[in-house]
Image (cartoon, rainbow, N blue to C red):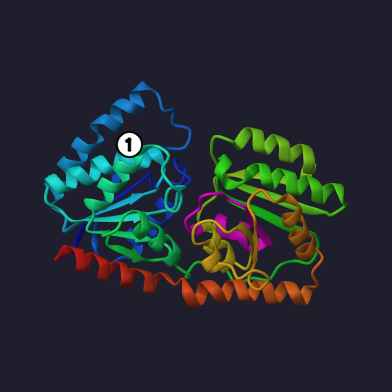
Amino acid sequence: MKILITAPSLDENENVSGISTLVRNIIRYGSNEFVHFEAGRKDGEAADTGWFARQTALPFRFYKQIRKHKPAVVHINTAFIPLAIMRDTALAAAARVAKRPVLLHIHGGPYVSGEFANPALRLAAEKLLQMSSAAVVFSDAEARSILKRFPGTKVRVLPNAIPLDEVPQTGREPGEKTFVFFGRLNKSKGLEHIITACRALKNQGFKFRYVCCGAGPEMLPFCSEMSKILGDDFDYRGVVKGTEKWKVLSRADIFFQPSRDEGLPIALLEAMAAGCVPVMSASGAVADVIEDGRNGFIVEAGNTDQTVGKLKFLLSESAAGWNEFRESARRTVRERFDFGSYLEKLDKLYTEIER
């Protein structure tokens, strides 16, 4: 089956994106024939007049690609944020004109569960869902939220997953614990919360390292502030990929990312598979993955006292406790988020909407 699939650039040097990571894996491991259509800004790409002009032309180029490749299904990956909703409503309209079924894959965003303040944006989201043969979300809670506001939507639940063949199973060296951040450096990732928590831990005498991997608009101010707090114990690596990514994760201890408006981060699953203990806020489907106090810790976004308390507990944990947390994190991904099962479910969805 031929699938036309949208995503930002699949080049990790151009884009730090969970959507891009997932789509790369779908194309690499899937049995279908995939044609990638680039939709989404590259890291550092300015939203100038040239960019807006290209967005205006995007639906027409999309329509031409549909006519050229004649896919059985059009797979649109989106996030429920304003620009993505407006863009992908136009892409879905192009697919409808071309008489191709659309699988709409929603990767988090504030409007998955939150109410729309802008009536025009809500109408666009409604039209986008109506033009889709099925909408995929990460959790039952997200499905209920979509159905409550947009009755009649054909919603399917499909949590993210990762291939496990490259995941290292190595032990950690004893000594200072290492925090790791993997992803796009923007405010929605809870960067201010990270800064405040790390400052509090440092002021209370806790020693730890912090490795930051990624890129984004808040890179410079975030790295500057973290360097002031931690000095040489803060290490910014930029964009890491492949074996280098797994090397970083296999040496880290705590995946600390108290994000707002997440879906189900691929980086979270990768970190847990490598044995990192996650400390995350309960946005999107994160709480479906992390069982607080068992395979990681859930914190309230912006609640510094609660976050610092849980991090102090974790940093003070015995070696036996750490081994238990790590193995529980690994087991969660191994048993529930295997990529082979994911592809089987995705293929069933393609077949379902093709008919």
Residue 259 belongs to the span the image colors magenta: yes
Can residue 345 be seen in the rendering of this structure?
Answer: yes
Q: Quadrant of residue 93?
A: top left
Q: Is residue 147 left or right of residue 141?
A: left
Compared with 94, 52 (above or below) is: above
Q: Quadrant of residue 328?
A: bottom right
Compared with 274, 146 (above or below) is: above
Q: 34 or 58, which lies in front?
A: 58
**Number of numbered discs present?**
1
Q: 280 or 127, which lies in front?
A: 127
Compared with 76, 42 (above or below) is: above
The residue carrying mark 1 is 120
**Span highlighted in magenta in the image:** 244-266
**Residue 335, percent from left and from top:** 49, 78
What is the secondary structure assignment of the residue under circle 1? helix
- Say which quadrant the C terminus sits in: bottom left
Q: Is residue 119 left or right of residue 223?
A: left
Residue drawn 18% across and 56% down? 101
Q: Residues within 10 Å of mark 1 (few under 14, many from 20)?
A: few
**Residue 350, percent from left and from top:** 23, 65
**Residue 325, percent from left and from top:** 68, 73
- Say which quadrant the N terminus sits in: bottom left
Can residue 167 be seen in the rendering of this structure?
Answer: no
**Residue 213, percent from left and from top:** 59, 47
Report the residue that reaches farthest toward the top: 49
Question: Mark 1 is on which residue type?
Answer: Ala
